[in-house]
Image: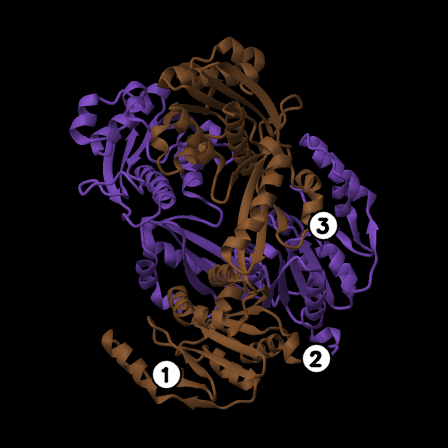
Chain colours: A purple, B brown
Amino acid sequence: MTTNSATNRQGAELLCVGTELLLGNILNSNARWLAEQLAALGVPHYRQEVVGDNRERVIQAVRDASQRARVLITSGGLGPTPDDLTTEAIAAAFNTPLQERPEVWELIQARLAGRGRPVAASNRRQAWLPQGAQVLPNPTGTAPGIIWSPVEGFTVLTFPGVPAELKAMWLATAEPWLRQAGVADGVFASRLLRFWGVSESALAEQVSDLLAQDNPTLAPYAGLGEVKLRMTARAKDGATAAALLAPLEAELRRRSGQNCYGIDDDSLASVVLAKLRQRGETLAVAESCSGGGLGAALVAVPGASDVFLGGVIAYANAVKQGLLGVDPLDLERWGAVSDPVAEAMALGAQRLTGSDWALAITGVAGPGGGSEQKPVGLVHIAVAGPGGCRSGEVRFGSSRPRAWIQALSVGEALNRLRLSLA
Amino acid sequence: MTTNSATNRQGAELLCVGTELLLGNILNSNARWLAEQLAALGVPHYRQEVVGDNRERVIQAVRDASQRARVLITSGGLGPTPDDLTTEAIAAAFNTPLQERPEVWELIQARLAGRGRPVAASNRRQAWLPQGAQVLPNPTGTAPGIIWSPVEGFTVLTFPGVPAELKAMWLATAEPWLRQAGVADGVFASRLLRFWGVSESALAEQVSDLLAQDNPTLAPYAGLGEVKLRMTARAKDGATAAALLAPLEAELRRRSGQNCYGIDDDSLASVVLAKLRQRGETLAVAESCSGGGLGAALVAVPGASDVFLGGVIAYANAVKQGLLGVDPLDLERWGAVSDPVAEAMALGAQRLTGSDWALAITGVAGPGGGSEQKPVGLVHIAVAGPGGCRSGEVRFGSSRPRAWIQALSVGEALNRLRLSLA
């Protein structure tokens, strides 16, 4: 091992701690999310490492990283159980004692009490942090992380493995810290355009000349039904970077037309709710194969209540008839997965709730229940509005998993409403 | 850097090569798949590393791994483009020249011709392998890998980054090789017990003596509301490993009682649906703050339709009154988030659908809408069944994000029904 001077240390490395990663029990989604964040911040990122819940290997990995990197970001191993040993191992890597932080211990007790959970003796371990380390607050969980520079020119930031806690801590504290610490190589500005109703390859062809650009760069990503284009500009300051993005965004919107539904943190649900709010109109749902997923997507958006009233989950045909007033003759003649039934469901939800708009979904989510005429992946969607009711089918393909077909149905229904409101 | 003797080298390490991993463009699903395979084969696996398409960093990572591991498995960087440099870097790590393999080059030409693809000069690079390395055949793509022992007691196996090619090559050649090479340390068998209603720290205390065991090992994991215990046994064969797990599982179930709700791929929804199916009973839901998430959790389970009938999403109070028949006086007197309203919602859903059981959820998901008396995170849940209706509150804590409170409400409601069916 050679000792580098502080100036040779470059960029950021990730160290993910968890035997469950080495056993293949879980995907390392934290590594991907953190890598995306580092890229967006313009922090060079050269290496990721995964080790198990093993003290000696964590110590070695931390020491090695401290020779190479300016910043080490760890995830996992901050919990209360004996196999949570990241904090202790990091302290040991630099021969530094742990020290109880009374204010952290008080916070942990308050958090647990607020949830009606007993305080276990083991929780107290989480309040012991290396001497000299700053607390990296955890706004949603019990275990805080640390921001600590044990040697000059090297800082370690620790996060729990629970993705939601890691993300909240990153956004509240780590990101501002990294912006100020001068680790970034210039300033990056990034915007994400979101698309529905176009495939990744078709969209990439529409913009192929722009994909070759150097600054700003443009990269396509495919999600579940959704496609995204990330624009990233690097410049000496944020205003210059933003100015580089503006003409590219305008060009992308011009070329993609109505397929572009939103930007950055928008969702189809948030965009639809905002449009309805602007018009002073309300929305209800009637769901068969999605079983409540459409309503759940809508209420995932804070403040949905001034637009979304509710609706009916009509999974059984008896509920479609009894609650939504679907005609049993239509069910018999066309089947539950049909335009007439989807329309009757939407109109039923509209009538029952008094909403201006209603969306209905009925389909074959699989894996069973498909036939030659009505295969798995066939979904009928109806949009009822002040001007009448429209319906249509969509085929997601019978090889798709059940959860995908359900999620795609929800997205497709929201997108049809979005286009109806355009 | 110290030089270990061959006998000190242990287990397998992964090295995934690809700048797209460091930019967060893709999830490292290869690492998870390979880790699962290694665990199933009983090959100890202590470390994973990711580096970009950078010659020096690949060379360093390979050299470091050759000091520690018996086997190094690499993925990525075997393609024809200039940024595919894994093979070359591995050869350079051991100062070994590359050598063209005419039989590989012929195969590459035949493969491309068979797909009607032109043969590019760059494809010829893929036929250059380190002197002394064996070819690891690629039955589905163009780029082969290598199996090579550049120093005694250390072998490197290389795979392309394309998951389907990697898997085919692994199963056809690498797995049999690992079985024969004596790297496997017996066979591993693993089971996951799932818990609701107990914190990770409380559960860990209940079983603290068992957490210290060596074989089988026991490790706790926290999810969203859920806690899991993974039991892993190592033995000379699968039957012996399973026999080691059985008494541990029995002991864990004895100690944890009703908190243990399932195993491996079970979910609270699948367990509840199975119990109701066994009893020949049906279920409906009435959802306010979860907005359909409870129904969606139920229909996520294939075959839910013989038990789950549907229900009402009563997000607005007008829908609670109009559809579910909640008394407006109760809404006024107790508020929408209260036991009387939760009970009226459950009874309404039961009556409307004719179900045997009904679950109702009403709460404050936040971030707005909380008050001192009814803070964010307060949720009331009612379970209506053939024997009557019961309700109660639960407090998830006002610092939790909206999506968590919604997801925890769904889990808690399903768990209360599970306990009612016990």
Cα separation between marks 2 and 1? 36 Å
Q: Nearer the viewer, mark 3 or mark 2?
A: 3
- Percent from the top left, x then y, of residue A145? 71, 51
- Single out the mark in the foreground, 2 or 1: 2
Do the dots labelled 2 and 1 sit on one chain?
yes
Report the mark closest to the observer, 1 or 3.
3
Label 1, residues with CA under 10 Å away: few <14, some 14-19, many ≥20: few
Q: Which mark is residue A82?
A: 3
Return the x and y of residue A230 as percentages of the image width and height: 45, 58
| B377 to A38, vertically: above or below | above
Say if A348 sits above or below A414 in the image.
above
| SS assignment at label 1 | helix
The residue that label 1 is drawn on is B122
Kindly report the distance in space between the C-alpha atoms of the residues bearing marks 1 and 3: 52 Å
Can you identify the residue that label 2 sits on?
B1
The answer to which of B195 and B236 lies nearer the viewer is B236
Q: Amino acid at mark 2?
A: Met
Q: How many marks?
A: 3
Q: What amino acid is labelled 3 in the image?
A: Pro
Quadrant of the rendered structure where residue A221 is?
Answer: bottom left
Subunit under mark 2: B
Q: Amino acid at mark 1?
A: Ser
Q: Chain of mark 1?
A: B
Where residue B280 sits: x, y (%)? 37, 24
The residue carrying pointer 3 sits among few (fewer than 14), some (14 to 19) or many (20 or more) residues within 10 Å by Cα, namely some
Whole-percent x, y for residue A342 in the image = 26, 31
Q: In terms of depth relative to the viewer, which is nearer, A72 or A84?
A: A84
| Chain for disc number 3 | A
- Tell me: A305 left or right of B121: right
